[in-house]
Amino acid sequence: MSNDLGRVEDLPADYYNGLRARNTMPLWPSLRAALPYGKPARSTAPTLWRYQELRPDLMRAGELTPIEKAERRVLVLCNPGLGLEQLKATPSIYIGMQLILPGETAPNHLHTPSAVRFVVEGEGGYTIVRGEKLPMHRGDLILTPPGLWHQHGHEGTGPVVWLDALDLPVVLGLEASYCTEGAPQTVADSDNASNRRFRRAGVLPYGTLDRSRDDYPMLRFPWAQVREALQDLAGVTGRGDPVHLAYINPETGRECMPTLGFSALMLRPGEELRMRRRSASAVLHVVEGAVTAFVDDTRHAMEPADTLACPTHAVTCLANASATQPAFLFMVDDAPLQRKLGFYEQCG
Ligand code: GTQ
């Protein structure tokens, strides 16, 4: 183990300045920062965004900024450890809270980053993705994969709010983020068609067997179905073992998006769950119930619609604060990206 590598100051100034002038740098003064021993250097702060605090600011945005002036009316949840301007909840995950008011539409576009919506509040909202109109109810997950047209609208009364999760920090880091505007889509399929085709695990539309797999066969995961599946799973899961479901591509059985992973957790009344420590960073969002989250050496009392950023390699413990009611959480993480990069690990 070497922690006393040569420093810049050890080099003749003319040599070092000459290297710089020729757009080169010596590695050894920076090596330990690039490859720290044992565990990565982390700047991400475990950070809680309380919906009760955020909501008034979001409603005020609805008064201050018409949708035409915003395109997407979003307040971004920014991790102070990473710098607010970076628009990062974790190093890889962008989280926004989007507001749409009755009668408004957010124009059709597509982009290179992957996005999903997780509905937080209100009725009457919808997203059209790839010509399929997808209703938005509390807790529904809707995919807008890279390169698929999507536009939003609101046919109800009262505000509709959802959480946006994007891999924008990754795609920006690759200098590959851009978007294309399009004419409004024509709805070409029945409402919610892809979910109706694929929602039952264990049986698939027969034609699936005879054609190549679709990257994104199912675009909407209604909360009512996920909640029911969690309760079924709880019935056959020992206490202390996580009641945890992954949102998957039903044709491949693998993650439903290329970089970010999505999952739902149920904490039974009074249950305390020590999560396996993982190399992935994550964002937790409470759907129902009261949860006390311990992340490394921080403690967060979470209520419905509260959102928490968890750094890579964090020690995470989740406790249901109620002895009588279950609690439900939605989780976003970057495990799919880390698996593809070949270093995803979990321990403990
Ligand atoms: O709704 O399409 O939070 O394009 C950021 C970028 C939402 C969206 C965001 C987007 C969208």
Image (spheres, helix red, strand yellow):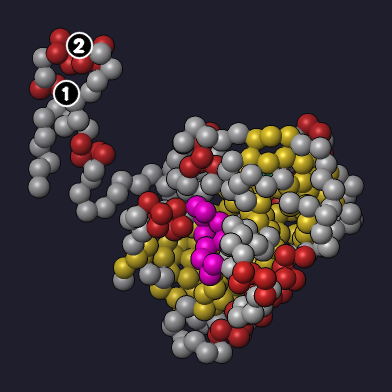
Up-down relation of residue 224 to residue 192 (above or below)? below
Residue at x 55%, y 42% (from the top left corner): 168
Residue 254, given in percent of the width and then of the height, sits at 51, 66
In percent of width and height, residue 164 lies at 64, 50
Q: Is residue 199 left or right of residue 155?
A: left
Q: Amino acid at mark 2?
A: Gly
* Residue 39 visible in the displayed image: yes
Q: Secondary structure at mark 2?
A: helix
Residue 8: which numbered mark, if any?
A: 1
Relative vertical location of residue 282 with respect to residue 324 in this rendering, above or below: above
Who is closer to the viewer here, 145 or 10? Answer: 145
Q: Is residue 284 magenta?
A: no
Residue 313 image position (x, y, % from top left): 35, 58
Q: Is residue 214 left or right of 314 when viewed as pictured?
A: right
Q: Residue at x 44, y 53 (%)?
A: 337
**Disc marking residue 58:** none
> Of helix, strand and loop, which one carries label 1?
helix
Q: Residue at image x 69%, y 73%? A: 205
x and y percentages locating residue 146 in the rendered image: 61, 46
Residue 199 visible in rendering? no
Q: Which residues are magenta?
A: 252-261
- At 82% from the left edge and 62% from the top edge, which residue is drawn? 191
Whether label 2 lies within 8 Å of ligand 1 gets the answer no
Number of the label disc, if any, that sits on residue 18: 2
Mark-to-mark CA distance, 2 and 1: 13 Å
Give above or below for 185 relative to 329: above
Q: Is residue 254 magenta?
A: yes
> Which three-letter amino acid code belongs to the residue tagged 1?
Val
Which corner quadrant holds the C terminus?
Answer: bottom left
| Helix, strand or loop: magenta stretch | loop
